Image (cartoon, rainbow, N blue to C red):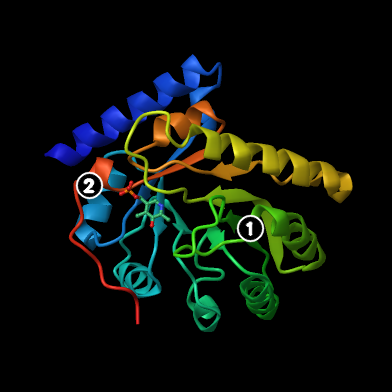
Amino acid sequence: MGLQENIKQVRAAIDEAARAAGRDPTSVTLLAATKTQSSNTIRAAIAAGITVCGENRVQELTAHLADDAYQGAELHFIGHLQTNKVKYVVGKVALIHSVSSEKLLQAIAAQADKLGLVQDILLEINLAGEASKSGFAPGEALAAARLAACLDGVRLRGLMCIPPAAHHPGENFHHFMTLRQLAVDIRQEMVDNNRDMDMLSMGMSGDYKDAVAAGSTCVRVGSALFGPRPPVLPEG
Ligand SMILES: *Cc1c(COP(=O)(O)O)cnc(C)c1O
C-alpha cells in the first residue's frame, strides 16, 4: 500500500535536506500527524517505521489510547488545547507542542503537579500574527519561557510554529529561521542557558524540507504520509 512507500519517501527527503544543510539526518524526527486516521492506519504507520505520532484532538487521542493504537511509538499532542481538557493530555503524552497561552501553561503545570510528574512542553509561537491561529507573539515568548522555568510541573523543551500554508518551495524558510533565532535568543536570556531547550517543531507536508534546512528537529507530517484528509469540523 501507499503508506509504507510515502513514509520511505518523506524520510528520504528529510535526510537529503538535512545533509544538504550540513546536518545529521538523525537529528530530525519525523512525527506522523495522525488526525482523522483510524487506529488501524496508525498501527500500520508504526509497523512501517513511524516512531512518533502527533494527535490534534483530545477526543481522537482518548479513543486511540483506549484502542492501544499507539503501541510501539511515542505519543505527542500537537493541536489546540483547551484548559479544561488538560487532564486528558498531561501525563499521557511525551510532549505537548502547542502551549499557546500562559493560562494553558499554568493549567498544564498544575495538572502535572497533581499527578506528581513533569510534563515536557514546547511554546507555540504565532510568527505571522495570524488572528486565526493561537500562540504567543514572538515578543511574548521570553516572558512565557521564564514563567515555564518557574513552574515545577513543566520542562520547556523548545518552540513550535505553524506558519501560513506554503504554496511554493522556499516560501516559509524565513519563518523557520525566525523561530530558530527566537529559540537561540530565549536560551541566552535564561538561567543556565536552559540546556533542555533543544527542540524546534516546525515543518508540515508543504514545507518540511525548508524547515529541515532551517534547523527543525521535528517535522509534523500528515497528508504527505496518509494522503489528503477529509475536511474536519472544529472540536466542540
Ligand atoms: C495537521 C497538522 C499537521 C500536518 O499537516 P499536513 O499538512 O497534513 O502535513 C502538522 N501540525 C499540526 C499542528 C497539524 O494540525
- Determine the residue positioned at 21% across, 61% down: 38
Residue with the mark numbered 1: 137
Indicate if the residue with disc 2 has its beta carbon within 8 Å of ligand 1: yes
Residue mark closest to the camera, 2 vs 1: 1
Residue 225 seen anywhere in this rendered image of the structure: yes
Q: What amino acid is at disc 2?
A: Phe
Quadrant in which the C terminus appears: bottom left
- Determine the residue positioned at 55% across, 21% down: 23
Determine crowd level at label 2: few under 14, some 14-19, many 20+ residues with C-alpha closer than 10 A.
many
Q: Is residue 93 left or right of residue 33?
A: right
Q: What amino acid is at disc 1?
A: Ala
Q: Secondary structure at mark 2?
A: helix
Image quadrant in which you'd find residue 90: bottom right
Relative to 163, say whether 233 is above or below: below
Residue 216 seen anywhere in this rendered image of the structure: no
Residue with the mark numbered 2: 226
Quadrant in which the N terminus appears: top left
* Measured Cα–Cα span from mark 2 to mark 1: 31 Å
Residue 64 % position (x, y)? 31, 67
Q: How many marks?
A: 2
